Image (cartoon, helix red, strand yellow):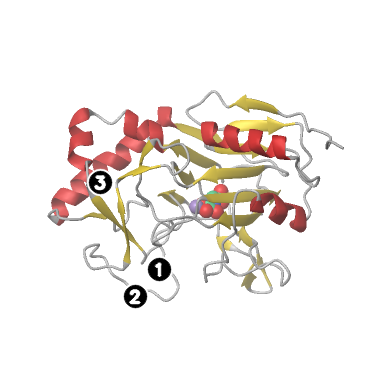
């Protein structure tokens, strides 16, 4: 007996990346055909959005597993598991209850970054599912790192060819000290992973610019001032508006992005309003 096939619609955002997938209630398990359609759309559009979902935590985790083995949380506020039975699920929120933050990132601006690239094997994908969203602020911007590489002026392409970059572990994307770290403003000596600036996506085989976050980044083998100047140029290039798409959140939105070929930025928002999202992360492999 053949399974009932879901019928999905893929609507590209019209910007440099991002697409909406319509026609699915993600509480219902996906058939193989639909799953592979979703993976194809994901590899083409880099960020997928599923709107109007009413997911149980279990459905969210099951859907996330479709993208690969899930990561166990990194130990920080954001990394505290939300439910004992679902250790992979964490929370992004500014809400404080009984003196305890419900999740990570607060209401702060999170500078352009890719998730956890200070690890040797950073996550392949991250998923966010919106439960409460403030009336304004807190938009999340994404930039297409394939396009960032392709549109790099030839002179810059030459300068980054074969170069490796230190992805600092000391500070998070709000510029705050990570748990267990000590202040260190010298990126040449700070702890972190070293990755190629131009990486090859393991599935699409396309080349992408790969940078973690500007703060405390360092290009190996350069004078610090030379590295700083080149990193400034690269970050200015990759955050140009024409390479980006902006997610304006609604309750029930589920987003999944590819950390191997995108970076993202989150706006701050009024801390008197509430923002609450559930989060998953998919295990990745060493960039090459
Ligand atoms: C993240 C992140 C952005 C947001 O969860 O990795 O950067 O919109 N979140 O909260
Ligand atoms: Mn992030």
Q: Which badge, 3 or 1, comes first in the chain's sequence?
A: 1
Q: Which of 80 and 140 is in front in this view?
A: 80
Instruction: Compute the Cα span from label 2 to label 3.
Output: 23 Å
Give the answer, above or below, for where 118 lies relative to 212. below
Instruction: Compute the Cα span from label 3 to label 1.
Output: 21 Å
Q: Which badge, 2 or 3, comes first in the chain's sequence?
A: 2
From the image, tell me which residue sits under label 1: 177
From the image, tell me which residue sits under label 3: 231
Q: Do the residues labelled 3 and 1 touch (CB within 8 Å)?
A: no
Q: Do the residues labelled 1 and 2 touch (CB within 8 Å)?
A: yes
Q: Nearer the viewer, residue 70 or 174?
A: 70
State whether label 1 is within 8 Å of ligand 2.
no
Q: Residue furthest right?
A: 1
Give the answer, above or below, for where 192 lies relative to 282. below
Q: Which residue lies furthest to the left in this view?
A: 223
Q: How many labels does the image show?
A: 3
List x then y, in percent, for residue 5: 79, 33
From the image, tell me which residue sits under label 2: 182
Q: Are marks 2 and 3 in contact (CB under 8 Å)?
A: no
Left/right of residue 31 with respect to residue 222 in the rendered view: right
Q: Residues within 10 Å of mark 1 (few under 14, many from 20)?
A: some
Q: Which residue is drawn at 68% across and 42% down?
A: 253
List x then y, in percent, for residue 263: 44, 44
Give the answer, above or below, for where 5 lies relative to 257. above
SS at circle 3: helix
Q: Residues within 10 Å of mark 2 (few under 14, many from 20)?
A: few
Q: In which quarter of the image is residue 1?
A: top right
Residue 242 in sight? yes
Instruction: Compute the Cα span from label 1 to label 2.
Output: 7 Å
């Amino acid at each position: 007996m053949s399974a009932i096939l879901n019928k999905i619609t893929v609507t590209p955002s019209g910007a440099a990346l991002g697409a909406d997938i319509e026609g699915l209630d993600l509480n219902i398990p996906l058939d193989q055909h639909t799953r592979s359609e979703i993976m194809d759309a994901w590899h083409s559009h880099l960020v997928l959005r599923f709107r109007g979902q009413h997911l149980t935590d279990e459905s969210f985790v099951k859907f996330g597993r479709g993208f690969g083995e899930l990561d166990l949380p990194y130990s920080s506020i954001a990394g505290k598991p939300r439910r004992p039975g679902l250790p992979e699920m964490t929370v992004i929120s500014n809400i404080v209850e009984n003196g305890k933050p419900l999740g990570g990132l607060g209401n702060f601006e999170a500078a352009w970054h890719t998730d956890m690239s200070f690890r040797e094997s950073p996550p392949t994908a991250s998923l966010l599912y919106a439960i409460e969203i403030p009336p304004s602020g807190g938009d999340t911007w994404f930039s297409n790192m394939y396009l960032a590489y392709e549109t790099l002026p030839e002179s810059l392409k030459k300068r980054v060819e074969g170069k490796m970059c230190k992805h600092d572990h000391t500070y998070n994307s709000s510029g705050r000290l990570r748990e267990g770290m000590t202040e260190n403003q010298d990126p040449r000596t700070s702890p972190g992973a070293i990755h190629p600036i131009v990486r090859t996506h393991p599935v699409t085989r396309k080349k992408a610019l790969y940078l973690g976050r500007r703060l405390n980044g360092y290009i190996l083998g350069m004078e610090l001032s030379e590295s700083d100047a080149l990193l400034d140029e690269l970050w200015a290039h990759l955050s140009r508006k024409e390479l980006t798409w902006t997610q304006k959140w609604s309750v029930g939105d589920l987003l999944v992005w590819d950390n191997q070929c995108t970076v993202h930025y989150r706006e701050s928002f009024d801390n008197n309003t509430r923002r609450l999202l559930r989060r998953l992360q998919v295990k990745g492999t060493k960039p090459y």
